[in-house]
Image (cartoon, rainbow, N blue to C red):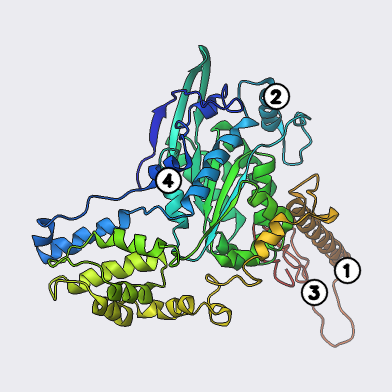
Amino acid sequence: MSKTIHIAAQYTKTGARIFDGNPFIEALPPLESSKQDIVERMTYLPPEPTSADRKASEIVRIAELAMLNTIVYPLSEYKRAGTNATQNIRETYVGRNPITTQDTMRRRALALRDRHATSLAFPSNFASTARGQALLGYSGCSKTTFANAFSLPYDVVIHHTRFNDLPFEHRQLPWIKLRVPHDATLKSLCLQFFTTVDRMLGDTQFLKEAQRADSIAAMALVMSRVCDRVAVGTIFIDEVQNLRSAKNGHAEIVLNFLSEIIESAGISLLIAGTPAVQQVIARSVRNIRKATSGGDNWFGLLNVADGEWDAFAECYWGYQLVQKKRALTKETLKAWYQCSAANPAFAALSFNLAQRLEIGGREFIDETSFQRVAKHDMSSLGPAVSALLSGKQEVLRNFDDLFFWTGSDALGELIYRIPSQEDWPQAEEFTDVVSKEAEAEAQAQEEKNEMSARKDKNRGKAENKARSGGVKSGGTGSRKTRKASPSEPLASQEPLPTVDPFSRSAPPSGA
C-alpha cells in the first residue's frame, strides 16, 4: 500500500468570495479555469508503444500490456461529475471556516458532546454546507476510475502552521476513500474509516479509541470528532450496492449514519454503486436527497451513435504490441463491440486478451482475435455481455448490477419530486439507531429482572426445604437437597443474553 503524501499548506486565492479567506479551501489545489481543464487533469494516456517495443520478446511485450491498466480515458460523464466534485469538496469547508467565531463554538460543542447529546448545543446559526454526490452505473463503467483520477491531488495530508501571519496548527485530510464491506455492517465501515485515517496520518491511534466505543451512536460521535480534528473534506465510499447484503434493517442504519455525517459533521460524501444500489437507497427519500444534493452522475455504456465508442476504440488501438500493427477496420471494430458491448472495462480487457492471444502467434489483431477471446477467454462474461447487447429488460433483470429494477428514471423521480411532510428531516437523524440500542438495552434489563425474580423464588424453595430438615416425604428412602452455592447458578437459571449493538441479528431465542 502506497504511503500518503504529506505537504505543507500553500494558500491560493480562488477568486470566489465564498471560498476565499478560508485556510482549508485556499490550501486545496488551485481551481481549474474551465470544465475541460478538470477533464484534462484527470486524463492519462501513456506513451504509445514504438516499433522497437514491438520487436521485444514475447514475454516482455505481454508484460508491457499492463500499461493498458493505467489509461484514464476521458468519458463524456467526466465533465459533469468532475465539475460537481470540484465544487463539493470546497463547499464542505464553507460552513467550517476554522478562523470564524461560529466554527470555534461548533468545534467546542462537538468536543464536549456526549453520546446522548446532553452537552453544549451547536450554534443556532450553524448550517452544514456539505454535499452528497452519487456515481451510478453498470459494473466496469469507470465510476471508481473517475474517483481515483479526480482525487489524485486531494489524496494528501496538508500541514498548516500559519495563516494570514497568525499561528494556525492543523492537519487536513481533503479526501478519504472507503469501501462498503461485503457484510455491510456499520461497525466494519466505521473501523475501516479509523484504520484509513491512522494509516494516512501515521502517528495516531484513533482506531483504538473507536474500539472502546460501546454503541453505534458512541462510535458515530468519535468519527465526527476525528473528522473535525483532521479537517476531513470528502469521504468517497465505493461499492455502496453491497448494502443490499445487510440484514435486519442495517442498510437503513448505514444510510442514516451517512446522512448524519453530511448534516452534523459537515462532511461531503461521494458514493459509487451499480444499479443494485437502488434497491437500498430508493427506500428512503430523505437519504436519497442528501446523497445526491451535490449532483448524481450516470456512468453507462460508451455511446455508439455519437461516436464515443469509435473514439475510445481508436485511442486504445494505438497501444498495440503485436509485431504487425494494423489499422482498425469496421469488421474488427464490430467484433470488438460484440465482445464487450461497449462497456469500457470489458473493452479494455478484451483488447488486452486479444493481444496476449496473438503475441507469439499470428502477431496481428483482427475480428477473429476478438471472436476467439469472446469464446474462450471471456466466456464467463458472455451472459452479461449478451444481456447488454440485447438491451431487453427481461434479460437484464437476471443481473442486478445491470438492471434498474423500477425503471431507469425511478431514482431521478425520487430525488427531484417535491417531498411530502413525512419526508422532511427529523430533528435527530440518528433517532432510529439510538432507539434500536435503547430497545436492546430495555430487553436485556427486562430479562435480567426476570432471571433475578426466578433466582429469588428458587432460593426461597431451597430455604423452606432446609428448614424442614432437608427430607422429602412420600417414600421409604430419603435424600437431602443440596443448596446451590452463591457462585453456582441455579439449574433453572438461564444465562443473560449478550446484546451487541453492532450485531446484524437479534439474540437467539431463549437467550
> Between residues 47 and 311, which one lies in front from this camera angle?
311
Q: Is residue 474 left or right of residue 269?
A: right
* Place of residue 112 in the rendered image (x, y in percent of width and height, measured from the top left): 70, 30
The amino acid at mark 2 is Gln
Residue at image point 79% right, 54% down: 419
In the rendered structure, which disc, 3 or 4, sits on the residue that comes first in sequence? 4
Residue 444, quarter of picture? bottom right
Q: Mark 2 — residue?
A: 102
Q: Mark 4 — residue?
A: 39
Disc 1 and disc 2: Cα gap in Å? Answer: 66 Å
Disc 4 and disc 1: Cα gap in Å? Answer: 81 Å
The amino acid at mark 3 is Lys
Name the element at disc 3.
loop
Q: Mark 3 — residue?
A: 480
The amino acid at mark 4 is Val
Q: Mark 1 — residue?
A: 461
> Which is more foreground, mark 4 or mark 1?
4
Residue at image point 25% right, 72% down: 354
Can residue 32 be seen here? The reply is yes
Number of marks: 4
Q: Residue furthest top?
A: 165
* Place of residue 307 in the rendered image (x, y in percent of width and height, measured from the top left): 40, 63
Q: Is residue 279 left or right of residue 65?
A: right
Residue 253, quarter of picture? bottom right
Can residue 498 be seen here? The reply is no
In the rendered structure, which disc, 1 or 3, sits on the residue that comes first in sequence? 1
> Which is more foreground, mark 1 or mark 2?
2
